[in-house]
């Protein structure tokens, strides 16, 4: 770090998510600067670095991580590239904020967990940004404080306007429901033990080959159940909602917060059209807390184990998509580092 303690961050991947993090680090976050950007597309890397003082564009991750002004890494590249980048960061002792997924499958995620455990200390925070959303945090506090008694069920909705070209049925679990999987584990403090995917009649708006919507049932180690409606071509907006039902009450988040407008015989409000809009403040808070913790020598937030556990539950979910049956989640033994 510089004499002023500013954290020099290398951002790996400058697509939509990575470019947004470059903007965030450069314009929103305090205590950090973008020291490097990395992308296999050299022109895109150069565009991301344009206008940022002291930022160097790279096409090679190893070269960027070896730069003397890089103190930490933010990984926003496609999931298959994450494992190599994480292990390279470990080798250089660099702390990492890794966008989800930690890696695309449980086997590679477990290799990352084991590599971090061998270091003897945490280095990774996984980008499950809902843990930094104000509403989710209030719900977590309510549940932890026993405000509605022991949680028994979660009812979740995850709706997107439409899917991009190439979106597969497995991505409904791996890219969308993965957030509810992590939120369920975090809100309840329990592991997911089994996943069942049910498919109602297919929406005519669903692209060819995609059974949309789907209903995903998550069973937990504490006996709670979470159901997730995932509807990724709903056509009208981006909606994420969650209701917790406890022994003595219930609590809902994600309801419309206004402004509500009455006009011309109608009433209503706005519905966000994408996740960047809905969770902008959560992304800001997530990155700011990562920077603040890293500057003080700490690692907090969702761990590599959380990334691994989510990957294992996603694998059970995609198996259930194919089989139509209840699929058990198989987890390795949890290293003491994550206790």
Image (tube, rainbow, N blue to C red):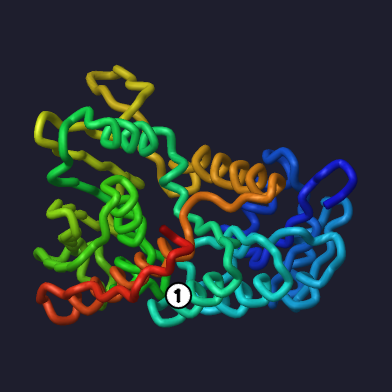
Q: Secondary structure beneath disc 1?
A: helix
Q: Residue at 46%, 67% (x, y): give it.
A: 101
Q: Which residue is mark 1?
A: 109
Number of disc labels: 1
Would you say residue 163 is visible in this rendering?
Answer: yes
Q: Is residue 322 left or right of residue 311?
A: left
Residue 251 screen position, x and y as percent: 21, 32
Q: Is residue 130 left or right of residue 8?
A: left
Q: Is residue 286 above or below residue 57?
A: above
Q: Residue at 81%, 72% (x, y): give it.
A: 66
Q: Is residue 46 above or below residue 138?
A: below
- Mark 1 nearby-residue class (10 Å; few <14, some 14–19, many ≥20): many
Which of the 4 quarters of the picture holds residue 147? top left
Q: Residue at 19%, 75% (x, y): give it.
A: 321
Q: Is residue 327 left or right of residue 133?
A: left
Would you say residue 255 is visible in this rendering?
Answer: no
Which of the 4 quarters of the picture holds residue 255? top left
Q: Residue at 19%, 59% (x, y): give it.
A: 221
Residue 228 screen position, x and y as percent: 21, 54
Residue 193 screen position, x and y as percent: 20, 66
Q: Quarter holding the C terminus?
A: bottom left
Q: Is residue 222 left or right of residue 99?
A: left
Q: 210 or 327: nearer the eye?
A: 327
Q: Is residue 17 above or below residue 129?
A: below
Residue 108 screen position, x and y as percent: 46, 80
């Amino acid at each position: 770090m510089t004499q002023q303690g500013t954290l020099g961050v290398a951002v790996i991947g400058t697509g939509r998510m990575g470019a947004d993090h470059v903007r965030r680090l450069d314009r929103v976050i305090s205590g950090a600067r973008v020291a490097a950007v990395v992308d296999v597309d050299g022109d895109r890397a150069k565009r991301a670095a344009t206008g940022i003082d002291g930022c160097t564009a790279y096409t090679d991750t190893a070269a960027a991580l070896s730069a003397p002004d890089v103190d930490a890494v933010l990984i926003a590249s496609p999931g298959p590239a994450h494992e190599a980048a994480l292990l390279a960061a470990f080798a250089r002792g660099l702390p990492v904020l890794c966008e989800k997924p930690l890696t695309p499958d449980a086997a590679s995620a477990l290799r990352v967990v084991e590599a971090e455990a061998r270091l003897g200390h945490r280095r990774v925070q996984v980008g499950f940004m809902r843990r930094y959303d104000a509403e989710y945090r209030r719900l977590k506090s309510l549940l932890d404080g026993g405000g509605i008694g022991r949680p028994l069920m979660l009812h979740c909705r995850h709706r997107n306007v439409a899917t991009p070209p190439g979106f597969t049925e497995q991505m409904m679990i791996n890219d969308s429901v993965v957030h509810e999987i992590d939120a369920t584990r975090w809100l309840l403090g329990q592991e997911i033990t089994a996943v069942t995917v049910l498919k109602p009649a297919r929406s005519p708006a669903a692209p060819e080959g995609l059974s949309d919507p789907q209903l995903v049932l998550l069973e937990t180690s504490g006996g709670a159940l979470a159901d997730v409606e995932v509807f990724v071509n709903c056509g009208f907006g981006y909606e994420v909602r969650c209701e917790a039902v406890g022994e003595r009450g219930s609590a809902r988040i994600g309801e419309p917060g206004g402004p509500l407008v009455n006009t011309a015989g109608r009433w209503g409000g706005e519905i966000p059209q994408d996740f960047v809009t809905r969770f902008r403040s959560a992304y800001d808070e997530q990155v700011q807390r990562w920077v603040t913790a890293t500057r003080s020598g700490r690692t907090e937030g969702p761990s590599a184990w959380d990334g691994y556990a989510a990957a294992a539950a996603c694998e059970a979910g995609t198996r259930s998509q194919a089989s139509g049956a209840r699929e058990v989640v198989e987890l390795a033994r949890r290293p003491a580092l994550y206790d």
